[in-house]
Image (tube, coloured by chain):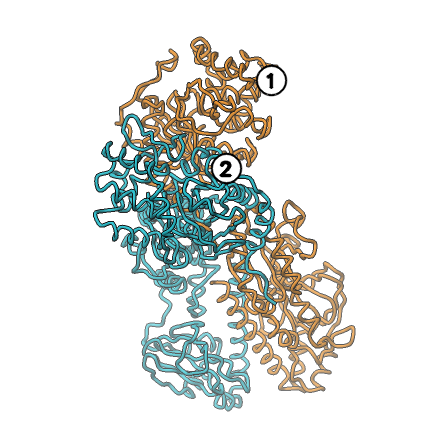
Chain colours: A orange, B cyan
Amino acid sequence: VSIATSPLSEILTRIHHDLAGLDRGEIADYIPELSRANPDSFGIAIATVDGHVFGVGDAELPFTIQSISKPLVFGMALEARGDESVLDRVGVEPSGNAFNSITVDAETNRPFNPMVNAGAIVSTALVGGSDPAGDRDRMLEQLSRFAGRPLIVDEAVYRSEKESGDRNRAIAWLMSSFGMIDGDVEAAVDLYFAQCSVLVSCRDLALIGATLANDGIHPVTCERALRAEHVTKVLSVMATCGMYDNAGAWMYNVGLPAKSGVAGGVLAVLPGQLGVGVFSPPLDPRGNSVRGTAVCERLSRDLQLHLLARGSGVQSVVRRVLRGDELRSNRLRTLAEDDAIASARSKIGLFELQGQLYFATAERAHREIADRLGGTEYVLIDLTRVSSIDEPALAVLDGLAESLIATGRTLLAVLDDPHSGWAAKLPPTVLTFPDTDTALEWCEDRLVESGPALAPDRARWPFGQLDLLEGLEPPELAAVAAAAEVRGFDAGATVLRAGDPAREVCFLLEGRVSVLLPLGDSPGGPARRLASFGPGLAFGELALLSGEVRSADVVCEEMSTVAFVSIEILESLAGPYPGLRSRIEANLVRLLSRRLRTANAQVRALAR
Amino acid sequence: VSIATSPLSEILTRIHHDLAGLDRGEIADYIPELSRANPDSFGIAIATVDGHVFGVGDAELPFTIQSISKPLVFGMALEARGDESVLDRVGVEPSGNAFNSITVDAETNRPFNPMVNAGAIVSTALVGGSDPAGDRDRMLEQLSRFAGRPLIVDEAVYRSEKESGDRNRAIAWLMSSFGMIDGDVEAAVDLYFAQCSVLVSCRDLALIGATLANDGIHPVTCERALRAEHVTKVLSVMATCGMYDNAGAWMYNVGLPAKSGVAGGVLAVLPGQLGVGVFSPPLDPRGNSVRGTAVCERLSRDLQLHLLARGSGVQSVVRRVLRGDELRSNRLRTLAEDDAIASARSKIGLFELQGQLYFATAERAHREIADRLGGTEYVLIDLTRVSSIDEPALAVLDGLAESLIATGRTLLAVLDDPHSGWAAKLPPTVLTFPDTDTALEWCEDRLVESGPALAPDRARWPFGQLDLLEGLEPPELAAVAAAAEVRGFDAGATVLRAGDPAREVCFLLEGRVSVLLPLGDSPGGPARRLASFGPGLAFGELALLSGEVRSADVVCEEMSTVAFVSIEILESLAGPYPGLRSRIEANLVRLLSRRLRTANAQVRALAR
């Protein structure tokens, strides 16, 4: 039985139901086309930054975008002309004046901001060029990228705008007289009328909002509509000037950067989280949709979406800290090696990071890592769960890397792809690994190297130093050695195959092998690496029990030499050496018990 | 060798060095005391929401807070009088006028906002009462709570303010004439002068900012200075009206709610992250500290602190999803039980949540849990790593709980304290557990119950059904049973003690025991529970190897019956039953191998 994947549908339905009865407000009538709108039309949609869209009521009904196009076109102007040259011609201060005010900043002659018509027409002129038809196509194409689908112009509204657009024409000519518009003034006003007449639905507005909330990348198409730094600028002017001369109260009560349109649309954005689109034609005296405002107030209050309400405090991005004695690589070692490095394992520290690294989280991670270093000499930082990292966070990581290395520590970074993006910007002294296991194994190898010499001084591991044969008398050892069939394998060769009957105990005398659990039925197919080991280790020991089959493949990682001791022969040795078999079995019980204790300790550490 | 715990000191030092040479601006001279400030004084401090403070330059130098007191006193007014009655007397719209403007909203006669002097004096009047001396103490006490240390008034500046305060007196009387001030006008202006003359340092401002960033709770003293909903309101007026008539450009360029003071202080806040305090007396023509503005612009750019830059996207709060076949409780079971529930284990799903649950993260968690439910019948939600949860998130969890239960699933919540705070608000149908292990065990018990009857139909577990004695011939079984010493234990009694020589294999015939690893040397002291089990399980089996000692305590959880089989007697049975010992050892190897495989699989699942 499946359950609803999100509570949002239900929440929107409730709010829509509660506010449908709110019938104050007047439909805009400054152009005839708009006055024909149905006052009862009412839709709400929300889109999340991970691309889920929820709608209720007339969420798919098309209406003209009107002034909601202004912040988007301002963003396009920034993209086309750069911040400085745009700000030479449009200010970013709230004016306290009506949207169609014809006043400008007395000092600079700039329109106050891009949300009043004067500033919007200047923005449009900065986007357009000398090719009216091409300009309109490009404008539509860019607006469509915000919505994630091809948008079109409502030609009837466009004609109506054009016919009743004298005041906007006057504003445009005044801007031209002030030197704020360079090119063809009529073409600029025309492009402005077209941009206002683009048809959108609440769903489109929600996705446009989610695109702004998502750093400028459309959450479904994954196409970039605007560069991230320009998104911040667009949201800034929406926050201070988006709701006409109601900006202060809007920030106070709703706290979401927003823009309304005279057709009844409202777009609101919660950066990093979601976009909201509302449509309801009746407007309040300031020109904002009455129900649109009410929906945003309600959403902000019920869901605590206010930008300046906490909600997004600094999470610790340090997911887990483990020492080398709590988590080991899946490299099996001889008892002597294990004992030799046991006390040194705590020199390895694994710090798993997760989530988004920006300055505050990176600074906190720096602090947590520095505080918990203790005697760590090998610092493993696992970044595979980090979803994003910005420049300031990268600088923090760089600084951490430098001071770790300067204090004689070794820094290892675990990265999904050590060659891409910011990973490539890590200082060259940082060692990179594709997974924690290989990084841990590398550290353990250093510990073994820096300890006493443990491996025998011969090419082939001697039978007398095999853990499984510990405590055997010299004649017993000699008998086992004599019974062993020693075979060489190339790298990649399979020594044991899962499912085969287990008739021999194996000893690795040279080389290196992996224990692989096949994930499918086909031999040589995908497999999970359970363990790896070098000379001195026994494998396939469960052959000592009767009737067992091999539980995994054993494959050579390099050229290897394996001694096979058949169980039949081992049983035949019971006559001359009655204690032999039981001594081997006791060793096996000890080895298994020890590994079980280690594994259980790891489970406890990892379950934290 | 220790390393610096944070890169912030270095960053602040660099910025301080770079901007110390910026010597534009004029020192305020409207009161004689301020004009004596040293133009070269320059301090910066940052405080994080987890209470770390970093300062550079004159970060500890005291100066008067001036207008930076305005948003704090506005907050106090909200706290004292409630939102509605405050908004009847002060607006929240940016005015575009100078801070000492005497104009008011023509429609309502309210001053435009609490950041201009008129609105600030009205706020102060709303905080004060009929007891001037007591009012000043209370004001100081409340401001001190923001700073986390006792603040005092600079009496010389206070007198100077009072002597040159005619314009503010005029404003106050005008506010009184409009009915915005009810009480003693002179007392209100006097309190206003005192509030402006409070001495603070950059460090204080940073901590005041961090208190606002931290939901109103001082990050070091952990005392609440302001209720969370009023913090949001205070930050809102700072965002739209905080930097005089430069609010739009400030939001555009810096993007942090902020307030400046005429003595040269600047307070900036990044909600959820940090507070910034800067001091440098020379002011720009708008009355904002030149270096203060430059520092904030630089911090915002270098560290990407802009409120409307992404940074705080929706993190997945689902830390890990595990199935009951990947993670099991540490309850050991008989082979028969284990096999019976093996295929049913995947009905158990464990969802570990972490971090801050607010609407967007809770909605996403809801979606992820719903998407990954599959055939899960027992839904365990581990909330022990959740750091905060707000009302909308709680509503989302409630809705999830209801639909899980409505679809016939069982919902188990793992909570640190099932009786406190929001935990108590969970629907009563949700079962709560103190840790994952006991919750998992509860689910496994239900799986065992709903399977075929496995336990023998007798009070005491029969020897013939013990896994370790599997495959023994009836006479062998009878011999072992005859050799066993059966003893009863009370709840809490110790059956085996760590460190004792291992001379007997034990079988639990009735009751329930725990395996405890002592964490110290004292018997009965703190211990880690490694496992627990019921009748049918053997323990202390390593006695079968010679020379072993007990590795852990075994303690009865309830009245229990244990059969002890001494190794000596077992060896004496080798004569009549030569295969006995080796069969038991083979069983032991099988059991250990099986447990090792399970443990290794858990390590792999948990290391994800």
| Residue holding disc 2 | B284
Farthest top residue? A163
The circle on residue A209 is none
Q: Is residue B521 visible?
A: yes
**Which secondary structure, mark 1?**
loop
Counting other residues with Cα less than 10 Å from the Cα at mark 1, is it few (<14), some (14-19), or many (20 or more)?
some
Counting other residues with Cα less than 10 Å from the Cα at mark 2, is it few (<14), some (14-19), or many (20 or more)?
some
Q: Nearer the viewer, residue A18 or B445?
A: A18
Q: Is residue A136 above or below residue B591?
A: above
Residue occupying image coordinates x 65% and y 86%: A575
Location of residue B589 in the rendering, given as x and y in whole percent from the top left corner:
54, 74
Residue occupying image coordinates x 55% and y 32%: A226
Q: CA distance from mark 1 to mark 2?
A: 38 Å
Q: Is residue B174 left or right of residue A194?
A: left
Say which chain tag 1 marks.
Answer: A
| Residue holding disc 1 | A129
Say which chain tag 2 marks.
Answer: B
